[in-house]
Image (cartoon, helix red, strand yellow):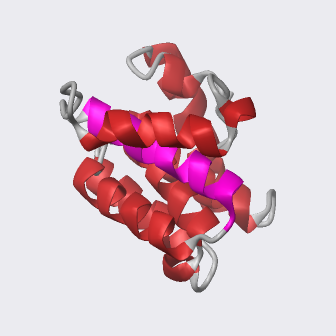
Amino acid sequence: MVLLLPKAPQDAELQTYLKEPVQLLENQPDLISERARNEAEVLNCLFVLKDWKQAVEKKKASLPEGWQENPDQLNNFAWWCFENKINLDEAEALARKAVELTTDSKDKANILDTLAEILSLKGKHHILDPSKVRQCKSVELNPISRGMRFH
């Protein structure tokens, strides 16, 4: 179900599938793990309530302690924002921070790819735009990742 929602967030039937579990979880919180409950709440905010700001706050609250200083967690959050086309200014800033924090070239390649995708989505895809340079650099650092997304 979770994999279907981002592909068809306008579909009322899929929204119904999300509303019922969220209501059930409110009444019987021990049914699933806290992580699954948090994910359901984030999806509910995004696709049922159409409140992306609340979804971002819930997503952040579900991240592990210290995520703001962990390049992988920063990249994952930035990629989540990119996938949902929300909170792109903060996602860009966090991806840039992740680039600065990481020392592993393969990780840096993935983060640079995230940053390039965010910049492109924001319309910063001009020929001399840094996103193009970063995208090329990400392939140079990790050629096997070209065209692959493991965020």
The foreground one among 133 and 120 is 133
- Tell whether position 48 is magenta: no
The foreground one among 57 and 22 is 57
Q: Give the tally of numbered discs.
A: 0
Residue at (59% x, 48% y) in the render: 109
- For the stretch drawn in magenta, what is the main secondary structure? helix
Q: Is residue 29 visible?
A: no
Q: Is residue 151 left or right of residue 132?
A: right
Residue at (60% x, 47% y) in the render: 110
Residue at (18% x, 30% y) in the render: 123
- Rendering coords of residue 23 (x, y %): 57, 48
- Tell whether position 119 is magenta: yes
Identify the image quadrant of the N terminus. Answer: top right
In the image, farthest residue toward the bottom: 66
Q: Give above or below for 129 relative to 107.
A: above
Extent of the magenta region = 104-121
Q: Is residue 68 visible?
A: yes
- Rendering coords of residue 67 (x, y %): 56, 77
Q: Quadrant of residue 62?
A: bottom right
Q: Give above or below for 126 relative to 116.
A: above
- Rendering coords of residue 70 (x, y %): 59, 75
Q: Give above or below for 94 relative to 41.
A: below
Residue at (31% x, 43% y) in the render: 86
Identify the image quadrant of the C terminus. Answer: top right
- Rendering coords of residue 84 (x, y %): 41, 37
